[in-house]
Amino acid sequence: MTSAAGLFGAAAAAPLTARSNGLRAWKTLAEDVKGEMAWAWDLYRQHAWGKDEIKPVSATTSSFPLKHHHLGLTLIEALDTLWVMGLDSRFRDGVDWVKGNADFDVDGEVSVFETSIRLIGGLLSAHHASGDPVLLAKAKDLADRLLPAFDTPTGFPYRFINLKTGAVRDPETNPAEIGTFLPEWGTLSRLTGDPRYHDVTRRAMVTLFEKRSKLDLLAVKIDARSGEWLDRRATVGSYADSYYEYLWDSWQLFGDAECRQMYQLCTAAILRHQQVWRDGRLWIADVDFETGRIINAEQDELASFYGGLLAQGGAMKEGAALTESWAGLQDRFGVLPEGYDYATGKPIAVGNALRPELADAAFNLWLLDRNPRWREIARIHFLAMKRWNKVEYGYTDLADVTSEPKRQADHCPGYWWSEQMKYYYLMFADTPRFDYKRNYLTTEGNVLLGFRRGA
Ligand code: DMJ
């Protein structure tokens, strides 16, 4: 284990305050982010055009969410980030590719959740940026292909569906894969005039809420056919995280007051039963959803987004404290490990999948109170990424954040193009293309509200 001071050196670790360099320094940093985006995009264009993901060490590619067929995932995830950065010719190039080549009529199976947050969300945000009706039509086509997955007794979707045949698989699902749809699908209903997208996804979200325990907690695994719980663990980490996010978001985006109430009830229960303070740091423990008994001290990196959500929902003190806990780990490891145990103080999973969550939390906190501390956390996140994840053909994930130097893997996930690059840029650039007061970003960082097209 190495300390952050040793890793970054004095220059990178020195805080960038308004006094030290002022606005100009943040603008310079924004230009740096934009330059990295343009550089990585051009390499993707050259070595992986139209493929789902680039493997930036070997300059090869991998497909996702289909196993053996590419849908242009990276390209679609990157579009609104390119646009908001003002990389307009690259944005147009990407949109042209989608209009001419994106075809979802493929005999292969996809994750309903991943396809929705990444591809439907990416197409809708590119539509928001450009107004191009073809992008909306593609998003609708894809949603129509996923829709049969929701045809279950509970209304919870099967986890997988074949894009061509509609064959479904795996009813053993979880809160995230049940309830991370409404902002994208409600937007689709609003734009197409067809209420089905909104209604099926909202129903799934509400029905899951009705399954909560007497403590108002949800567990992490449930059967979409019977509605029976298959597990007892309540968590805000993977498989549950974005369910809570989308309860709040549906209030934010659509003014859905029932979603806000559900969010508030769930959050009060989480803070009552899962909040743990250890050595002055706040963590959110996994507990038994019926008894509240703490199950373990394991923290999932994905849960580092949760401080931003807590703050958005009004729990500013807890949201700030949780984000500081994760920022402390960032200082310690340079890049967050995928898993950490607050009881032993040790990482339990040493990789990092080029994750955006801490930058996401910092962005949401900064939008709320403009405290320069959140920008600083994002700046450290960005500089660490440049130092450790940058390779010959782009940015890669890490196999071991504790080794010296950090061991790199060879994969750039689609969300990198949609999430942290956008959060950094929006925080540092103060761009007129984005409405900093009234906006909405999905769990995948796709902007569905707040772009200013004329700017
Ligand atoms: C993203 O695909 C989304 O934010 C999702 O909700 C969970 N996290 C990944 C990236 O880590």
Image (cartoon, rainbow, N blue to C red):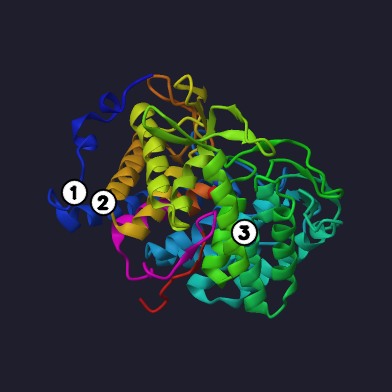
Q: Quadrant of the C terminus?
A: bottom left
Label 3 crowding class (10 Å Cα cut-off): few <14, some 14-19, many 20+? some
Q: Are marks 1 and 2 in contact (CB under 8 Å)?
A: yes
Q: Is residue 425 magenta?
A: yes
Q: Distance from label 1 to label 2 (Cα)?
A: 7 Å
Residues 37 and 350: in front is: 350
Q: Which residue is mark 2?
A: 372
Picture quadrant where residue 298 is located:
top right
| Residue 367 coordinates in the image, percent (x, y) | 36, 59
Q: Residue 224 appears at what percent x and percent y? A: 81, 49
Dot 1: what SS? Answer: loop
For image coordinates 49% across by 33% down, the residue present is 352
Which tag, 1 or 2, sits closer to the chain's start? 1
User: Taking 143 as reference, is 6 above or below it?
Assistant: above
Identify the amino acid type marked 3: Met
Residue found 50% across the figure and 64% down from its top: 93
Q: Which residues are magenta?
A: 421-445
Q: Nearer the viewer, mark 3 or mark 1?
A: 3
Q: Nearer the viewer, residue 321 or 108?
A: 321
Mark 2: secondary structure: helix
> CB atoms at circles 3 and 1 under 8 Å apart?
no
Residue 17 image label: 1
